[in-house]
Amino acid sequence: MQEDSHSYNSLRILSQTAKGYVGQCHCCTHFNFAYGNVLFVFTEDGLRGFQSVLYGDYPMHSLAEPLPHGKTHLLPSPIPNFMLSFDDVELEEIRTMFQEALLVLEVDKIFSYKK
């Protein structure tokens, strides 16, 4: 991983749960999505793109039989043989975090437009 001057404590948290958060970096305006032991860093376009993945614009596989650890949704990645797995509660929690975070960004744009 490349070293840089970012501090992961300099995030503006846009949405969070006990398992994760969506935050905006104060220094570079990139967005962090952390959930469980996974951390993604997105541009705003990437953040919106991942939300569209969560809402069906990309093939997420729903399993008829859960995996041994109870996960029923698989999200393929561009890396061969690497997928993210979620249960129903996790998927809904992540979708809600993205909705909340993007709503905060829309409110920011409305208020910055009126200045």
Image (cartoon, grey):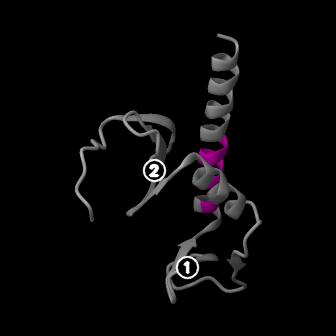
Rendered view: 28 above or below 71: above
Rendered view: 30 above or below 107: below
- Toward the viewer: 44 or 84? 44
Q: How many marks?
A: 2
Quarter of the view holding residue 78: bottom right
Q: Residue furthest top?
A: 115
- Toward the viewer: 72 or 103? 103
Q: Residue at x 69, y 18 (%)?
A: 113
- Judge depth for marks 1 and 2 and give the one in front: 1
Q: Earlier in the sequence, mark 1 or mark 2?
A: 2
The circle drawn on residue 20 is 2
Quarter of the view holding residue 8: top left
Is the magenta region chiefly helix, strand or loop? Answer: helix
Give the position of the N terminus as an image quadrant: bottom left
Q: Position of residue 19 (x, y in %)?
A: 45, 52
Q: Which residues are magenta?
A: 91-99
In the image, residue 1 lies in the stretch drawn in magenta: no
Report whether 41 appears left or right of 15: left
Q: Position of residue 82 (x, y in %)?
A: 49, 83
Q: Give the CA distance from mark 1 to mark 2.
A: 23 Å
Rendered view: 16 above or below 110: below
Q: Residue at x 66, y 26 (%)?
A: 109
Under circle 2, the secondary element is strand
Residue with the mark numbered 1:
78
